[in-house]
Image (cartoon, grey):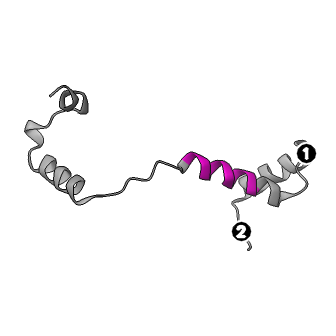
Amino acid sequence: MNVVLPQNLESYVDELVQTSGYKGSDEVVSEALREHQSRRQGMEVVMTPELERQLDEGLENLEQAKTTDELRRS
């Protein structure tokens, strides 16, 4: 795989390799992707038919909309 980075990111990766003990740019990119992946886990939202219905209903009635705190108290 070849990845083209903007010059500022390429310079940053080179700097990390030179100063932070990485053996190469592939280690920097791999670590960054692992961290990105771990932050995203569990954050994906599954759009169920019920959630879609509620969102549509909320958009149709914005003037009567409630905050999530208000809905939890109901």
Q: Over which residues does the magenta segment extend?
A: 29-39
Horizontal side of 27 relative to 33 (left or right) equals right
Image quadrant where one finds the C terminus: top left
Q: Main secondary structure of the magenta part?
A: helix
Horizontal side of 49 relative to 45 (left or right) equals left
Neighbor class of circle 2 (other Cα within 10 Å; few <14, some 14-19, many 20+) is: few
Count of labels shown? 2
The Cα–Cα distance between marks 1 and 2, rounded to whole angstroms, is: 21 Å
Query: Does the magenta run of residues contain 44?
Result: no
Front disc: 1 or 2: 1
The residue under the point 15% across, 49% down is: 59
The residue under the point 53% across, 50% down is: 41
Q: Residue 17, image x and y in percent?
A: 87, 50
Neighbor class of circle 1 (other Cα within 10 Å; few <14, some 14-19, many 20+) is: few
Mark closest to the chain's N terminus, 1 or 2: 2
Q: Residue 3, image x and y in percent?
A: 71, 68
Q: Which residue is mark 2?
A: 3
The residue under the point 70% across, 51% down is: 32
The residue under the point 22% across, 56% down is: 52
Residue kind at label 2, given as amino acid type: Val
Q: Which residue is mark 1?
A: 21
Disc 1, SS: loop
| Residue that sits furthest to the top in the current view | 73
Residue kind at label 1, given as amino acid type: Gly
